[in-house]
Amino acid sequence: MRFSTTETSSLTVLKRSGVTENFSRAKIVNGVRKACQGRPVTEADLALLAQTVEEAVRATGIAQLDANEVGLAILEPLRKLDEVAFMRFASVYQGWESLEDFESAIRLLRISHQGNGGQHDQTLTSNVESKQTLGQVAG
């Protein structure tokens, strides 16, 4: 009988508090599950989203990521899965404080529905990432 070993690189997340912990798909699922409450999203959908996020962050080749980078990696797969859940997650994650924050995101979602494929999709993700960066600079 032959045995093979599969190596997986260690992936750690640096939290805002300065604590480092191992990347966990379960934490992704639990965090996103709250945004998906009452939405037509299954546990299988959540598991696939967590896998997609893990693959994306591992593809960067970076062994230690900031928690913020993991949050940003969640946004686009969640938007594709369920836009209402995306809005919920992004609003909490980004700390939206006004109706204008929601209106801006809704406007970008509408643009993404009007065509030009992924071009507008990337615009939405970039805008949300920019807002996060601006929030960090201002805060």
Image: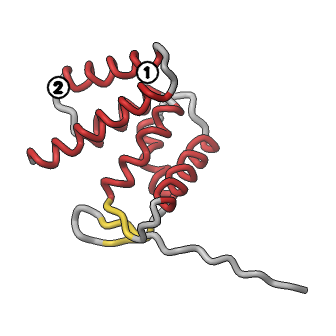
State the residue lying farthest toward the left. Answer: 138
Q: Quadrant of residue 49?
A: top right
The image shows residue 53, relative to residue 62, as above or below, that is above
Q: Of the residues shown, which amino acid type is indicated by label 1?
A: Ser
Task: State the SS at label 1.
Answer: helix
Q: Determine the residue positioned at 29% across, 33% down.
A: 127
The image shows residue 52, relative to residue 37, as above or below, that is below
Task: State the SS at label 2.
Answer: loop
**Whole-percent x, y for residue 111 in the image:** 39, 17
**Which of the two marks, 1 or 2, is nearer to us in this view?**
1
Q: Tell which of 45 and 104 is nearer to you.
A: 104
Which part of the image, by quadrant, shows the N terminus?
A: bottom right
The image shows residue 72, relative to residue 13, as above or below, that is above
Q: Tell which of 112 and 54 is nearer to you.
A: 112
Q: CA distance from mark 1 to mark 2?
A: 22 Å
Residue 1 appears left or right of 82: right
Residue count near mark 2 (Cα–Cα under 10 Å), binned few <14, some 14–19, many ≥20: few
- Contact (Cβ within 8 Å) of mark 1 with mark 2: no
Q: Tell which of 40 and 116 is nearer to you.
A: 116
Disc 1 marks which residue? 112
Q: Determine the residue positioned at 30% across, 53% down.
A: 68
**Whole-percent x, y for residue 126 in the image:** 33, 36
Q: Of the residues shown, which amino acid type is indicated by label 2?
A: Ser
Q: Quadrant of residue 87?
A: top left
Q: Determine the residue positioned at 60% across, 47% down.
A: 48
**Whole-percent x, y for residue 21 in the image:** 38, 71
**Whole-percent x, y for residue 16 in the image:** 23, 61
- Which numbered marker is on residue 78? none
Disc 2 marks which residue? 98
Residue count near mark 1 (Cα–Cα under 10 Å), binned few <14, some 14–19, many ≥20: some
Which numbered disc flags the more N-terminal residue, 1 or 2?
2
